[in-house]
Image (cartoon, rainbow, N blue to C red):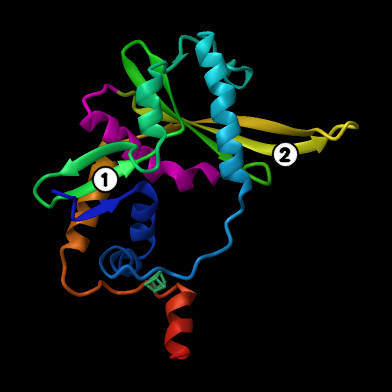
Amino acid sequence: MKPTYKVSPSSLNLMLECPRCFWLQLVKKERRPPTPFPSLPSGMDKVLKEHFDRFMEKNKLPPELNELKGYKLFNDKELLKVWRSNFKGLQYLDKKSNILLRGAIDNILTRGKKLIVLDYKTRGYPLKEDTHEHYINQMNLYNFLLRKNNYQTEDYTYLLFYYPNSVTKTGEVIFDTKLIKIKTDPKRGENVFKKAIKILQVENPPKANKECKFCKYKNENL
Ligand code: SF4
């Protein structure tokens, strides 16, 4: 039986922002107007995956991860291919509601038997103090998914940020990197998923987020 709904870390971020928008998107297939999305991050993601995979083949870590001792890159290539796919990813089906949670990861580190999610982030500027906080929900959900698939995880994950520094005389763009360790709680991920299940099962849409300009714009222009 096909899942009634498929949710992902990004749609669950939308739910935390505005439960109404989440409900409209999933139940009524009504999407908020799209905002232009720069294509650099997805292009970088692809190049970075290839770069990391070359090191994985040699059983080494790339220089960006020099500070990590005792870690390896996850080397089950077939599984990684599935977990990286936007159409498959790591999955967990809540049987009672028939709602599927799925999330595509960038990479996995291992330390002994434990798995640690490693996510690449491309930005235009160096990080602010709180930049990483935007990704905590996503990381909680990944660890929740790994646990539901019977893998052991550490109670943290890593974000590896890339941001431009300068251009060389020969035209190559130099990127700086920053590795951030994020405390991660799968239980919180589970609670967010449970909240989403509840919202998707109500008949009428929840209240809108008053701060959001889209609904106001839409209502004023009807
Ligand atoms: S308030 Fe904004 S986020 Fe919420 S439903 Fe309206 S458009 Fe969507």
**Element carrying mark 2:** strand
Residue 128 visible to an observer of this rendering = no
x, y (%) of residue 110? Answer: 40, 16
What segment is highlighted magenta in the picture? Answer: 131-152
* 10 Å crowding of disc 2: few (<14), some (14-19), many (20+): some
**Element carrying mark 1:** strand
Q: What's the residue type where badge 2 is placed?
A: Pro
Q: For residue 146: magenta? A: yes
- Tell me if residue 8 comes above or below residue 105 in the rendering: below
Disc 2 C-beta below 8 A from ligand 1: no
Residue 77 visible to an observer of this rendering = yes
Residue lying at the far left of the rendered structure:
96
Query: Which residue is painted at 83% across and 36% down in the image?
Result: 167
Contact (Cβ within 8 Å) of mark 2 with mark 1: no
x, y (%) of residue 136? Answer: 41, 42
Q: What main secondary structure does the magenta stretch of the protein show?
A: helix
Number of on-image labels: 2
Q: Nearer the viewer, mark 2 or mark 1?
A: 1
Query: Which residue is painted at 11% across and 45% down in the image?
Result: 95
Q: What's the residue type where badge 1 is placed?
A: Leu
Query: Which residue is painted at 57% across and 19% down in the image?
Result: 65
x, y (%) of residue 208? Answer: 34, 74
Q: Can you tell me which quadrant of the image ligand 1 is in?
A: bottom left
* 10 Å crowding of disc 1: few (<14), some (14-19), many (20+): many
Q: CA distance from mark 2 to mark 1?
A: 34 Å
Residue wearing tag 2: 164
Residue 194, labelled with which disc? none
Residue wearing tag 1: 101
x, y (%) of residue 24? Answer: 31, 69
Question: Upstream in the sequence, badge 2 or badge 1?
Answer: 1
Q: For residue 79: magenta? A: no
Query: Which residue is painted at 43% across and 91% down in the image?
Result: 222
